[in-house]
């Protein structure tokens, strides 16, 4: 009787093989040991799990390797039924439904051994390789100051790191371990953060395909209760993190036996209405599964939104995101405080709510049209707001999953106090240099005055001498012109600061600067050599660049003084060269003084670092800042007891490089 009853369901539910459904499964290869293609066949942990579920649930599978973009389009259009091994993200949830998780893994960070990146907190201004449309991508794109190199597959992301096109690789921990072993790079790279994020792998089906979703969830639950799951896991990962103990297995076997007995009793007691009851239970279970799946997805969405909000609010800079029409999507507390507004303006247009000037508005809308990025730009907005005077800002485009521009990301930093401190330090340093210049010019001024005085005293006795009259008519005006040039140079240097950009002839600026030191250098017995090409022009602030020349020449003189005291230098020389190379105007100021040690050379541009007993440590730091503000570069090459060479590189005025910078 028992055998008869048991065979009835088998007989009644048997199907012709031609009625067995075949589901199309799309997968993105390149993530071993989870899923990859070998000789045209799908392999990996995810594939074995799906095959086992198909066997238990009575359907067949056809696998299709696909790209990230194609797989998303195919699931929306129904060209495939199932996506294999995909993590839950908010964007994915809009176009597909997810099964229960069948395995959990960790998102980790891989970096070259010996690099400066040792933990997640070190990530700043680095290039990150990672796979698109993943949990790690959704997380990393909200981190500031990182450059994302997005690939379609995990193994391609690792190749970007190996080829040094990225500084770190962010991805699945197990895939990292597998590929590192396969490529024999374990000695060159290390996992510096093995638990950055926790990620669950699921299967995905077309939106609202609850029949297939329920069928897959049932298969996952059955598989987890069986020993096959542990076997598959051990096959690909060597050891199961939480293996089923023998005691638990016996308990499960006992439960299965009890379940079978209960089913038999149930069939005997409700034989005549079992089909109706079975259908009711199945529908109820489907609804419960759907409800639980929805609750899980809602929870994950809330957690994701909360994480994004925390990242936004933890930033020390003001952060504003705008949609493609210029409407404010998000705005953190720092940004609200900077502009004296509250978050009630979210959802309104930026240009109608915050006054930041036409220049910044034009750049924001320019980003939407050209996708151009503006980084580390400075702007005076004191006329628009009482809270701040100077800001630095970054403007970057925001892309959607299809890499189409979807909005703008605006970072803002208040640098008012930094700017005021910089101006103050500049004036302090300028005062110190002015004192030294005046001391050096005293003798230079005294010489022409003495000459003029001598001629004046001789006028009464030689007024009738024609030769004397010719000499006084020639020499006195020349000496007066010399005095006038010295005083004009000193007055121009001492006038109040403030950046004023104009076209500058470097040859004239270097000659006028050298004139300030000529007498002092001559009195010390030093040589000053000028090798200057004429007609070399740049655009910049003349006072700032002249300040740099003066600082470097003063340092050169002090370096020669120190060497002369120690070694009695036979031919102390300061050489100034000006020449042009490939649209670059180059100034070299070289001395054969005492030079610097490697330790001093490493810190010479640091503010307040000085080797002088009465130095401020600000001269070269300010010099580097001025060169940077005038779109130039400064380098120092020095060797102890042999001398130093400062190299200043400017963009030639009128070149294509200069035009590109001014347009930007």
Image (cartoon, rainbow, N blue to C red):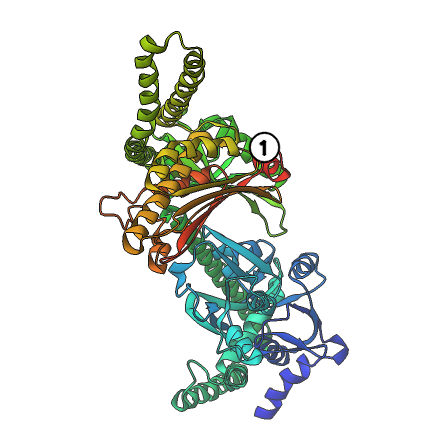
Residue 29 point in image, percent of width and height = 64, 70
Residue under the image location 42 percent in, 90 percent down: 250
When the figure is inspected, residue 658 is found, relative to residue 3, above or below; the finding is above
Residue under the image location 39 percent in, 64 percent down: 119
- Assign a secondary structure to mark 1: loop
Instruction: Answer with the quarter of the image where residue 333 lies.
Output: top left
Instruction: Answer with the quarter of the image where residue 579 lies.
Output: top right
Q: Is residue 341 visible?
A: no
Residue under the image location 47 percent in, 89 percent down: 257
The C terminus - image quarter: top right
Count up the numbered dots. Answer: 1
Residue positioned most to the left: 613
Residue 663 point in image, percent of width and height = 59, 34
Q: As drawn, is 493 to the left or to the right of 298?
A: left
Q: Which residue is mark 1?
A: 535
Q: Is residue 38 visible?
A: yes
């Amino acid at each position: 009787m028992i055998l008869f009853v048991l065979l009835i369901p088998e007989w009644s539910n048997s199907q012709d093989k031609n009625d067995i459904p075949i589901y199309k499964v799309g997968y993105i290869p390149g993530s071993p040991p989870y899923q990859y293609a070998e000789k045209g066949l799908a392999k990996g942990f995810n594939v074995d799990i799906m095959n086992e579920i198909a066997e238990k649930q009575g359907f067949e599978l056809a696998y299709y390797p696909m790209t990230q973009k194609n797989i998303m389009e195919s699931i929306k259009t129904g060209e495939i039924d199932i996506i294999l091994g995909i993590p839950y993200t908010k964007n994915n949830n809009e176009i597909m439904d997810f099964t229960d998780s069948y395995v959990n893994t960790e998102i980790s960070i891989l970096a070259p051994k010996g690099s400066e990146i040792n933990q997640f907190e070190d990530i700043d201004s680095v290039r990150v390789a990672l796979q698109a449309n993943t949990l790690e991508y959704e997380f990393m794109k909200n981190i500031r100051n990182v450059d994302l190199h997005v690939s379609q597959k995990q193994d391609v992301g690792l190749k970007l790191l190996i080829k040094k096109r990225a500084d770190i690789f962010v991805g699945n921990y197990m895939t990292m371990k597998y590929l590192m072993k396969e490529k024999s790079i374990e000695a060159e790279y290390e996992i510096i953060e093995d638990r950055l994020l926790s990620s669950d792998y699921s299967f995905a089906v077309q939106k609202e395909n609850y029949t297939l979703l329920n069928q897959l969830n049932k298969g996952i639950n059955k598989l987890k209760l069986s020993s096959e799951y542990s076997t598959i896991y051990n096959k690909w990962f060597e050891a199961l993190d939480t293996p089923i103990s023998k005691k638990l297995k016996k308990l499960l076997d006992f439960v299965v036996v009890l379940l079978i007995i209960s089913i038999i009793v149930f069939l005997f007691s409700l034989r005549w209405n079992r089909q109706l009851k079975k259908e009711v239970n199945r529908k109820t279970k489907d609804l419960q599964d759907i409800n639980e799946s929805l609750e899980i997805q809602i929870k994950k969405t809330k957690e994701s939104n909360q994480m994004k909000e925390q990242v936004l609010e933890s930033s020390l800079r003001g952060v504003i995101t705008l949609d493609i029409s210029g409407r404010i999507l998000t705005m953190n507390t720092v940004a609200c405080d900077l502009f004296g507004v509250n978050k009630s303006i979210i959802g309104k247009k930026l240009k109608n709510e915050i006054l930041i000037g036409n220049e910044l508005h034009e750049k924001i809308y320019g980003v939407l049209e050209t996708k151009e990025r503006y980084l580390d730009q400075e702007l005076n907005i004191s006329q628009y707001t009482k809270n701040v005077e100077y800001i630095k800002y970054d403007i970057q485009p925001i892309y959607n999953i299809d890499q189409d521009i979807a909005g703008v990301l605006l970072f803002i930093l208040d640098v008012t106090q930094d700017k005021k401190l910089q101006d103050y330090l500049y004036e302090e340093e300028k005062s110190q240099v002015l004192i030294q210049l005046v001391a050096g010019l005293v003798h230079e001024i005294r010489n022409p005055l003495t000459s003029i005085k001598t001629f004046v005293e001789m006028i009464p006795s030689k007024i009738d001498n024609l030769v004397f009259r010719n000499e006084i008519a020639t020499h006195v005006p020349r000496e007066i012109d010399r005095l006038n040039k010295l005083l004009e140079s000193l007055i121009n240097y001492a006038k109040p600061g403030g950046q004023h950009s104009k076209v500058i002839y470097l040859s004239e600026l270097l000659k006028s600067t050298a004139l300030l030191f000529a007498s002092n250098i001559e009195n010390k017995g030093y040589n000053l050599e000028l090798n200057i090409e004429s007609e070399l022009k740049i655009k910049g602030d003349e006072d700032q660049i002249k300040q740099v020349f003066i600082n470097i020449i003063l340092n050169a003189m002090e370096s020669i003084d120190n060497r002369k005291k120690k070694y009695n230098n036979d031919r102390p020389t300061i050489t100034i060269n000006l020449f042009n190379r490939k649209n670059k105007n180059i100034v070299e100021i070289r001395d054969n003084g005492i030079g610097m040690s490697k330790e001093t050379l490493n810190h010479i541009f640091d503010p307040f670092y000085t080797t002088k007993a009465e130095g401020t440590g600000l001269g070269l730091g300010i010099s580097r800042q001025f060169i940077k503000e005038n779109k130039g570069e400064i380098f120092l090459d020095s060797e102890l007891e042999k001398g130093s060479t400062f190299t200043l590189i400017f963009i030639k005025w009128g070149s294509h490089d200069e035009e590109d910078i001014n347009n930007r």
